[in-house]
Amino acid sequence: MSLFISFEGIDGCGKSTHLDLLDEYLQGLGYSVLRPREPGGTAIGEKIRKILLEKTEDNMLAETELLLFLASRAQITREIIAPALHEGKVVICDRFMDSSVAYQGYGRALGPERVKLMNRFATGDIVPDITFLLDVDVEEARSRLDQRDSEKNRLDSETVQFMQTVREGFLAMQKAEPDRIKLVDTSGAKESTQMYIREIIRRYLK
């Protein structure tokens, strides 16, 4: 069976950790799992990713940022994600369309409804079957980011107020679509959080 899963949340919420754990779990059950890189994941998408994350691009317009994300998403959806779902694979994305609504629609104040409509065009109306919104306090998320060894990119350098606006945007989206977007509190132990995620996934696999 095909299943499209996405993980969303502000930077530092624990997406990578829980995506890795869920990937391992599903593969252990015998499922073929594909993990596209977003933005990026294709030859064209990787070139776009480099532009988006480059710290020297500090004068990028919000509209330009959104259109670059959508261009990368259009490419990877048609080149990678749609064919994988057609083949019956499980696709897990670290971010997808909801990130653009939260970051550019709410955070950059371009308007969530406008960004949703543009996302539909970019993805050909392909929507994740289930989205895990990993939620954490902004200050805690910032503390986790500061402890990382990796170099910060352009989007990691946003203000606390910007991240708070993005978080509130994500929460508003979850309230509007509770059947698809599942709220996951990541302030506790990662083991209990992952057990909760797996329990939800098992319902879909049945």
Image: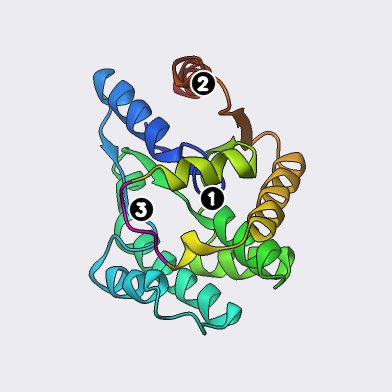
Q: Mark 1 sits on what residue?
A: 127
Determine the residue positioned at 36% across, 42% down: 91
| Mark 2 or 3, closer to the camera | 2
Residue 156 screen position, x and y as percent = 47, 59
Specify the amino acid type for callout 2: Thr
The one of 199 and 172 positioned closer to us in this rendering: 172
Q: Is residue 6 left or right of residue 160?
A: left
Residue 159, above or below 44: above
Q: Mark 3 Cα within 10 Å, few/some/many (few <14, many 20+)?
A: many
Q: Secondary structure at mark 1?
A: loop
Residue 57, above or below 164: below
Specify the amino acid type for callout 3: Ile
Residue 141, above or below 58: above
Residue 103 screen position, x and y as percent = 60, 61
| Mark 2 or 1, closer to the camera | 2
Determine the residue positioned at 48% across, 64% down: 155
On the question of residue 134 being in view, the answer is yes
Q: CA distance from mark 3 to mark 1?
A: 11 Å
Q: CA distance from mark 2 to mark 3?
A: 27 Å
Does the stretch in magenta take in 152?
yes
Specify the amino acid type for callout 1: Val
Determine the residue positioned at 45% across, 39% down: 15
Q: Mark 1 Cα within 10 Å, few/some/many (few <14, many 20+)?
A: some
From which residue to which does the magenta span run?
A: 149-153
Residue 51 screen position, x and y as percent = 36, 77
Q: Mark 2 sits on what residue?
A: 193
Residue 114, above or below 56: above
Name the disc covering residue 81, or none: 3
The one of 119 and 101 positioned closer to us in this rendering: 101
Q: CA distance from mark 2 to mark 1?
A: 24 Å
Residue 106 screen position, x and y as percent = 70, 62
